[in-house]
Image (spheres, rainbow, N blue to C red):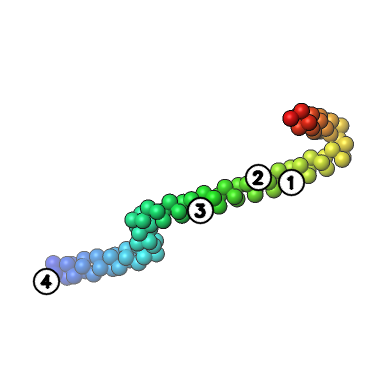
């Protein structure tokens, strides 16, 4: 009798764990993930799109950060700080010389 109850409790616990596991697997969208691997063309297409979006984001971010850096450098030159202003002015002169040579 005692063994039978223990078996029933064990079966009940296992059933609950299986239900929890199935809910967690559904939340992970594991079936969609596996379907993606079954279709290599779709996987390549999605990875290509992700790469293009990542590259575009980096280009836009770098452009904005570069513009911000140039704006700050211009403001520092306008302030005419002795050491920093001279250093930046020298950098600007070097860049302009290099651009005019090519």
> Tag 1's secondary structure?
helix
Q: In the drawing, what numbered circle is on residue 1?
A: 4
- Residue 78 sits in quarter: top right
The residue shown at (65%, 48%) is 61
At which x and y percent is residue 70? 76, 42
| Mark 2 burial class by Cα count in 10 Å: few <14, some 14-19, many 20+ | few
Element type at mark 3: helix
SS at badge 4:
loop
Pointer 1 residue: 68
Looking at marks 2 and 1 on the same chain, the residue that comes earlier in the sequence is marked by: 2
Among numbered discs 1 and 3, the one appearing first in the sequence: 3
| Residue 16 percent location from the top left of the image | 28, 68
Image marks 2 and 4: residues in contact by CB distance under 8 Å = no
Spatial CA span between label 1 and label 3: 28 Å
Q: Place residue 11 in its image quadrant.
A: bottom left
**Residue drawn at (13%, 67%) of the image:** 3
Residue 1 against residue 93 in the figure, above or below:
below
Query: In 3D space, how far apart are the residues under numbered discs 2 and 3 (Cα atoms)?
Result: 20 Å
Judging by the rendered image, the residue that carries numbered circle 3 is: 49
- In the rendered image, which residue does mark 2 sit on? 62
Q: Tell me the distance, in whole angstroms, between the alpha carbons under discs 1 and 4.
A: 79 Å
């Amino acid at each position: 009798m005692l063994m039978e109850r223990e078996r029933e409790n064990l079966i009940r616990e296992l059933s609950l764990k299986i239900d929890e596991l199935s809910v967690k697997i559904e939340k992970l969208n594991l079936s969609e993930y596996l379907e993606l691997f079954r279709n290599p063309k779709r996987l390549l297409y999605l990875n290509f799109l992700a790469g293009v979006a990542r590259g575009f984001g980096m280009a836009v971010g770098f452009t904005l950060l570069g513009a911000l850096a140039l704006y700050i450098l211009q403001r520092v030159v306008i302030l005419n700080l002795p050491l920093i202003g001279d250093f930046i002015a020298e950098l600007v002169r070097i860049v302009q010389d290099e651009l005019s040579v090519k």
